Image: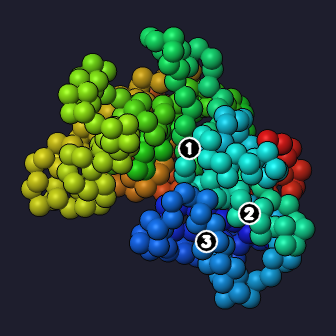
Amino acid sequence: MYEIFVINPGSTSTKVGAFWDDKKSFTKNIHHSKKEISSFKRIIDQLSVRMDAILDTLKEENKKIKDFDVIVGRGGALRPIESGTYRVNESMLKDLREGRQGEHASNLGGILAAEIAKAASIPAFIVDPIVVDEMDPIAKITGRPEIKRRSIFHALNHKATARIVAEKLGKNYKDLNLIIAHLGGGITVGAHKKGRVVDINNGLYGDGPFAPERAGGLPTWDAVDYFLSNNFSREEIKKKIAGDAGVAAHLGTNDMREVVMRIKKGDKKAEEIYSALIYQVSKEIGKIAPVLFGKVDAIVLTGGISKEKNFTEEVRKRVEFIAPVYIIPGGDELKALALGALRVLKGEEELKEY
């Protein structure tokens, strides 16, 4: 058996866990105060604070770094790469430290993994970062030659969920055509064709359905007119598209549990926005089916919102004519990272170089 330590940095937390093969030994969600995090100018400046918290956790759990076979970090905003498990090398560390593809807490995943692994001379990996790009070239073309569609999505959970459904179907992921919808703070709906995500909406900046904190696709001219007429700065526009957007902009909350409670109390506005979100997710699933020529083995709903039974049932009613619908609630990113490393350690997949 292999012992694997996993690190998943988020905006105000660092989730860590230890696994014996695919069996969880322990997990912990280390919280960082917003005040502490906001005192740092750049994401990379948070490194020592998060490192100390992780090392303290290992002491509490009576774990030594040398006990582990590998340290795995969540992949960050790197240049576009294929799906898979990658060795953390100097080229990757340089890009993560510089934040060339964007500042994101996940950039710290590979760096933390490498720093911890170095102390015990063991390898450090990342698995399926948000920049996984397997899109068909034709899927990237837009109506402006200067602008191409980009692949930015919940690759880690998409791929992990795809393998879970493949196992349920008794088939190999690489033999299936799937439509997977990750329903979280951002929403991404992807066409998985024989193991590759050949088309996907950009879940971060302005593509696909709106989400709890994303605007999704907007009518282009109306959006341009709104941003220009209000003299918004570049950063303000980004926040209007991702952050203070979607459900949060309409209802003042990005918590879908709160939205459901408000609906139960008779809030008609909350009900309208909730229904619109169901409509847009369903529409995106239907829109992507022709990418697979309608030959879809399964539709999969995953992510935090998929825990809401009413939401998933309403989506199911609209899309089950395409293919059977599977619900895989939530998303265990720590386990997905551990499994990515395990496939390499067992020789089921090749370790990739960045």
Above or below residue 254? Residue 139 is: above
Marks 2 and 3, Cα distance to the nearest angstrom? 11 Å
Q: Earlier in the sequence, mark 3 or mark 1?
A: 3
Q: Which part of the image, by quadrant, shows the C terminus?
A: top right
Label ID, residue 113: 2
The answer to whether residue 41 is left or right of residue 256 is right
Q: Secondary structure at mark 3?
A: helix
The answer to whether residue 317 is left or right of residue 348 is left
Q: Which part of the image, by quadrant, shows the N terminus?
A: bottom right
- Residue tagged by mark 1? 102
Q: Position of residue 173 (x, y in %)?
A: 69, 38
Mark 2 or 1: the one toward you: 1
Q: Residue at x 16, y 55 (%)?
A: 263
Tell me the amino acid under the disc marked 2. Ala
Is residue 65 visible to the viewer in this orientation of the structure?
A: yes
Tell me the amino acid under the disc marked 3. Arg
